[in-house]
Image (spheres, helix red, strand yellow):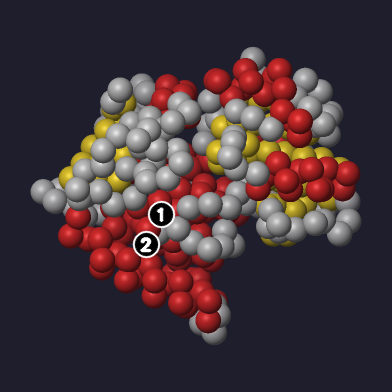
Amino acid sequence: MQEIDAQGLKALLLAGDARETVFAPNSGNAGDSLIAEATYQFFDRIGLAYSPVTLNDRLSKPSRVIIGGGGNLVMPYHNVSSFIAVNLDRCEELIILPHSIRGHEDVLARLDERCTIICREQRSFDFTLAAAPRAKVLLGHDMALLWNREETRRRASRALTTHPFDGAFQLRNLKLWVRDLQHRGKVKDGTLNAFREDVESLGAPLPPDNVDLSHVFATDSMASHYSARAVDALVRFLDRAERVRTDRMHIAILSTLLGKTVEMHDNNYGKNRSVYDRSLAGRFSNVTFSD
């Protein structure tokens, strides 16, 4: 089994030659904003030069392509697989950052020696080895575990000064502030219930004071300044809680990194349990898993 740590990831990302590198962050909710924010921070730390693109883009020329981490290569999501299907012929090299993978075998089968896929848990690693036999498959950790709070604070503050006339950005900041006001009363006696209300829910009855934070603080863009502001707003909300109960993987990871007492629950296809076993258990004493 080939495992990759932060130093190995740095070496991999900086191994490219003078070819243009593009980065396509995974789209989604505030949990995906956390992944994107941690990834932008990591790129800055290692000095990686890149151009941002989105998963909706068709590349205009051959490029070295990095796709952001997440849980998009599972059904019913198609953003990453569609991007790969459209752009694979323009990928001089393709690196998929730590992902959960449970489907899209047709696209995975097309990946060849140009492609490196990093899985963030064992089940995805085993699945991808079989589904993409010509690609290089590695086992790593979710990018959010590289996140730094002070860097987000600085980046979020700087975003307000560098984008003062971006109307969509300012409107999004207003929405984040309003949603914070709307939901702050749901943190009762220091406990926050933050269970998901979407297709990945296990379907159990939700607590009456539940607030699906990843949905509430979702942004409509994974651009660097949007991600920084979304994560900063998420952190400020979580600062009110001492104990967090959630089946949102990145609410659990962020709360753990913030030092909260975390009770983590599974989603409907088991990625939370797999990531907990791979990256959290035995490393953080403040998070436990509830079956």
Q: Residue 37 shows which numbered tag?
A: none
Which residue is label 1 attached to? 215
- The N terminus lies in which quarter of the figure? top right
Q: Quadrant of residue 138?
A: top right
The residue most toward the bottom is 165
Q: Closest to the observer: 277 or 283?
A: 277
Q: Closest to the observer: 148 or 55?
A: 55
Q: Is residue 277 visible?
A: yes
* Side of 182 where 201 appears, left or right: right
Relative image position of residue 244 (x, y in whole percent): 25, 42
Q: Residue at x 40, y 51 (%)?
A: 214
Q: Residue 233 shows which numbered tag?
A: 2
Relative image position of residue 150 (x, y in whole percent): 40, 56
Q: Is residue 251 visible?
A: no
Q: Residue at x 45, y 64 (%)?
A: 229
* Side of 43 where 182 appears, left or right: left
Relative image position of residue 78 (x, y in whole percent): 65, 44
Q: Amino acid at mark 1?
A: His
Q: Nearer the viewer, mark 1 or mark 2?
A: 1
Q: Amino acid at mark 2?
A: Ala
Give the CA separation, mark 1 to mark 2.
13 Å
Secondary structure of the residue carrying tag 1 is helix
Q: Is residue 172 above or below residue 279?
A: below
Q: Residue at x 55, y 20 (%)?
A: 122
Q: Is residue 117 above or below residue 55?
A: above
